[in-house]
Amino acid sequence: CALPFVAGLVIGIAFGYAGASLPFVISLLSDIPEAERAPWYFLAYAMGYIGMMLSPTHLCYLLTVQYFNSSLIRAYRYIAPIAACSACVILLLFGLYRYLY
């Protein structure tokens, strides 16, 4: 879950973090039975997405900050709590999915 998050944070675009980190995640999960891999794939993709949303290199984020004449730091005050809540929900769903299946 950390590798996709860091890749999303560094790259800032969905196909970039997916292409850079998900092959490693898939190879790391090869020992787990195929039926039990889905929650791990969900967790990896979702954490990469949160990393992408927090990335200062995300183009939508940069254009929005420029358009509204704001600063990156001021915008993070609004984005960080939403990302933290999203991460909590993702972890709850991951735990629930692993518990049920």
Image (tube, helix red, strand yellow):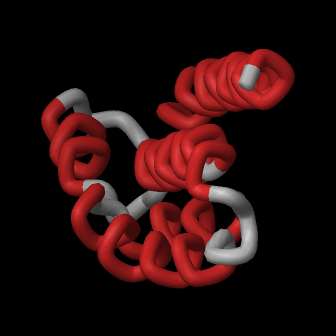
Which residue corresponds to the image point at 56% horizontal and 65% vertical from the top-left? 4
Q: Is residue 1 left or right of residue 55?
A: right
Which residue corresponds to the image point at 55% horizontal and 43% vertical from the top-left? 38
Q: Is residue 74 visible?
A: yes
Q: Position of residue 55 (x, y in %)?
A: 46, 57
| Image-quadrant location for residue 44 | bottom right
Q: Position of residue 100 (x, y in %)?
A: 77, 16
| Image-quadrant location for residue 3 | bottom right
Q: Is residue 9 left or right of residue 96?
A: left
Residue 47 vs 90, above or below: the answer is below
| Nearer the observer, 90 or 95 | 95
Which residue corresponds to the image point at 14% horizontal and 35% vertical from the top-left? 67
| Image-quadrant location for residue 28 | bottom right
| Nearer the observer, 82 or 92 | 92
Residue 36 vs 78, above or below: the answer is below
Q: Position of residue 93 (x, y in %)?
A: 70, 19
The total of numbered circles placed on residues is 0
Check the picture and name the quadrant holding the N terminus: bottom right
